[in-house]
Image (cartoon, rainbow, N blue to C red):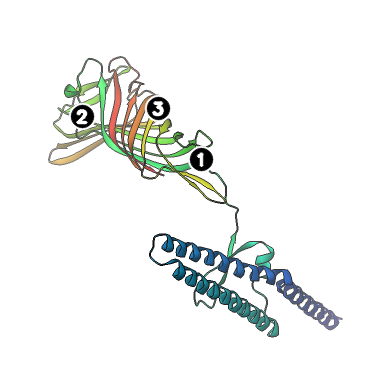
Amino acid sequence: MNTITKITIFLLFSLYLTNAVAQENDELEATPEEIEALRENIRAYEKEALKIEVESINKRVSSKDITYEQGENLKQEVAKKRALNIENRIDILEKRIAFNKRNNLPFPYSKRVKDQRKVSISFGDNDANLAGLKISDSESKPVKYDIRTSNDMVFAIGFNNAIIDGVSLSDSPYKLGGSGFVELGWNWKTRLAKNSNFARLKYGFSFQFNKYNLKDNQYFTQEGSNTIIDTFGIDAKKIKFRTTNLVVPIYFEFGPYTKVEKKDRVRFHTWDKFKIGIGGYAGVNIGSRQKIKYEEDDDNVKVKQNGNFDVNPFIYGVGAYVGFGDLSLYAKYDLSETFKNDALKQNNISLGLRVDLD
């Protein structure tokens, strides 16, 4: 009984494999529609290539590089060449299909053509391509006619300081050269008008890092519930204070553009164009830190103090930029005060360079 069971299982398994292979070969066998689709791809490519060559010849005639008669002769030559290309490539295609069928080899393009995957045509001697046909695994996606919203990364860097109530910028407790800011974010840009790209709305999110280098051995300290600037007890080598904000910027951007219209799409480009942006930002403070570096008993000491500086948790301000292409001169000013208390009234101000990687 055990032997009969084994034989039965073996026969059933063999039958299953035979059926599976047969089904696979049936699925991979080319249909007349698929073969004709490949022929049509070859014809379409050669016709488009001929069109480009004829346009190039017409331009040479218009610019008087060649005479009209020479141009007509060249057109006849390229037309003959493209006709022979179609004939030869289709012949190669059909011979390859016949070779595969004669040797029980699967038709490699069948399922991909059924799935409407991309069939491209290229020149070259690569044996992996069939008569210049290359099958891509990626799905062929239709081209979107108009794209009104694009996105890009934003990076800015420059000088940072503060406008302090009753104190001039020259008397600021912060070093003008040592204090700086960095901004890093991601923005979306939407064209406001349907047929014009002169006005755009730019919005997204950014991390703003505002750093103050304090001078004259001054540092931030707490006095009750207030943050004040006091003199550090030891001669410090360096004292820095930094706030980190997460904001949502919104800017109205204006400037010239280039409109490119094609048969299947229209694009509005601002590459290498003048632009000006006016707007603002709002967000939250997500951190503050003070670093103090000094020397004690011939040892270098670094002190890091996080938080507890009564920094305003909500940030909002105005900004503007002007420039060409990706690069702009950028300024921003916090309308919200850096600290919540009344002991130290100051508003952050920054000036630097901004890069929009459109």
Q: Secondary structure at mark 3?
A: strand
Q: Secondary structure at mark 2?
A: loop
How far apart are the two marked residues, 1 and 2, measured between alpha carbons?
A: 43 Å
Q: Is residue 207 visible?
A: yes
Q: Identity of the amino acid at label 3? A: Gly
Where is residue 159 shown, x and y percent of the image?
25, 34
Mark toward the start of the polypeptide (3 vs 1): 1
Where is residue 161 shown, x and y percent of the image?
25, 28
- 240 or 168: nearer the eye? 168
Quadrant including the N terminus: bottom right
Residue with the mark numbered 1 = 149
Mark toward the viewer: 2 or 3: 3
- 251 or 125: nearer the eye? 125
Residue with the mark numbered 3 = 280
Q: Secondary structure at mark 1?
A: strand
Residue at position x 41%, y 33% in the image = 253
The answer to whether 56 appears left or right of 274 in the picture is right
Q: Mark 1 and mark 2 in contact? Answer it, CB < 8 Å.
A: no
Q: Residues within 10 Å of mark 1 (few under 14, many from 20)?
A: few
Q: Identity of the amino acid at label 1? A: Thr
- 136 or 300: nearer the eye? 136
- 133 or 307: nearer the eye? 133
Residue with the mark numbered 2 = 214
Where is residue 33 shown, x and y percent of the image?
72, 69
Q: Identity of the amino acid at label 2? A: Leu
Residue at position x 34%, y 33% in the image = 321
